[in-house]
Amino acid sequence: MSLRDVILIPKEFPQDETVRVAAACVADGDAVAAGQTVLELEFSKAALELPSPSAGFVRLLCAEGDDVPVGAAAAEIHDSRESALARPAPAAAARPGSGAQPFLSAKAEELVLRRGLDTGPLAHLGLVRSADLVPAEPAPAAPIPAAPSTAGDGEPLPRAKLAEIAALAAGQNALASGVEALVRLPGPADQAALGGLRSLFTPRLLTLLCGLLKRFPALNGFYADGAAHFHPAVNLGYALDMDLGLRVAALGDLDGASPEAARDAVMDKIRRYMRGRLAPADLQGVTFTVSDLSGEGVDSFIPLIGADQSAILGVCSPDESGRARLVLRFDHRMLEGRAAARFLNALKTALEAQST
Amino acid sequence: MNGPTDNDFLPRVLAVIARELKRDPAGLGPDDAPGRTPGWDSQQHMRIVLALEDSFGVEFSNEMIVQLLSARALADHVRELTESAAAR
């Protein structure tokens, strides 16, 4: 009678240091089949089921509502019910804060390796996050007392929203600039692909963007630690925000795709988004994002650049003459305004070439 | 055989549309459409199509989603899909 498998919390999204256990689908000592869902996990961008890798008897190491570090053991599979139930209590063995060696988040581990930091004094924390390793900024000498708030204690934001804020708070937005151009949308190719539903999105725009990003690699990369990083391939992101939380769906490289194929790529993601079935693979690795608010009646807006990206394209609503504003917001550390303007003009020229 | 304006599915399709648009079904008719009916924009159109798929157990192709742009057209297509499934 012995332990057969340990089920670890997978690392699905780079920004997640912990994952919330949304539901335990089995109880200690339950028999499980290979592939049977043991836990439902709530990552920042998606909910996922965690299956058992083998048949056996389960021992849970976490409970509903727990925030479990990525990489930590979530459950064990034993070859007998007795073995599963005979294990020591999980709280003492595996949970953060138990007095064992501290678990390092991915970012914390990177910091420790890069700076040669000693985590010994932090062992009591259980889970060490990057923030635990970086000294806090000194407080201002004479802080100005805040006025009493009349807004109450505030309403806690959902976990997904907090992750979104963390991703958008990266430095690239603080040093972002923008250029804009008016362009006639949609062109004939879009109209053919979209029938009468023309405000849904603009497929031709997406395919042209993928081709242009290869000519302007600074817009398909990101700045970090004093260096310009370039993604080896284009993975176009399409922002979905239909009252179910903001998600950026990864469409891949649509360069050369027909407008109908681009339409299908977006609509398939919209279907999964609306049915709550977006998987990590649907969201990962985006290198450039399009935020299309053309159906919302806006003349202009300021899109925010996502993590590990240097730019985002905002699509505004067409005016009465059929011209819509495109807003390219870009990280000024990766390129200058002139290069961004050339990119946008190249896009405009290509789009309007479809109209003639 | 029902004609295009005599579709038994139309009242049920209108009920689904009304639910998605949060409207009174009595205030909707076969000519209501995206871009013409208040609140029925492209996003709502996708919601309506998915709700129709769930309600009638059918699946719209992407090509049809962008072509079926009225309550009557949606009801006719639901009828076609349902009859086609029954014939198999």
Image (cartoon, coloured by chain):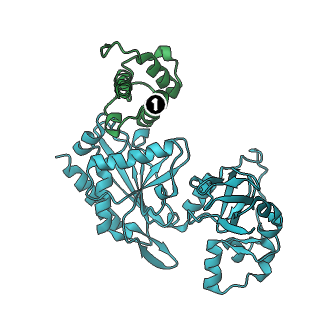
Quarter of the figure with residue A216: bottom left
Mark 1 chain: B
Return the residue at label 1: B57
Element on which disc 1 rests: loop
Label 1 crowd bin: few (<14), some (14–19), many (20+), radius 10 Å: few
Quarter of the figure with residue A299: top left
Q: Residue furthest left?
A: A356
Instruction: Residue A259 in the image: state x and y as whole percent.
Output: 27, 48
* Left or right of A89, for residue A109: left
Picture residue at 72% right of the left edge, 68% below the top? A3
* Left or right of A45, for residue A94: right
Nearer to the camera, A161 or A102: A102
Instruction: Residue A133 in the image: state x and y as whole percent.
Output: 70, 77
Q: Which chain is displayed in cyan in the rendered image? A: A
Q: Colour of chain B?
A: green
Nearer to the camera, A185 or A230: A230
Nearer to the camera, A348 or A213: A213
Picture residue at 32% right of the left edge, 60% below the top? A210
How many numbered callouts? 1
Instruction: Residue A74 in the image: state x and y as whole percent.
Output: 70, 62
Residue B4 sits above or below residue A106 on the image: above
Q: Residue furthest bottom?
A: A116
Q: Is residue A165 visible?
A: yes
* Left or right of B23, for residue A39: right
Q: Is residue A183 visible?
A: no
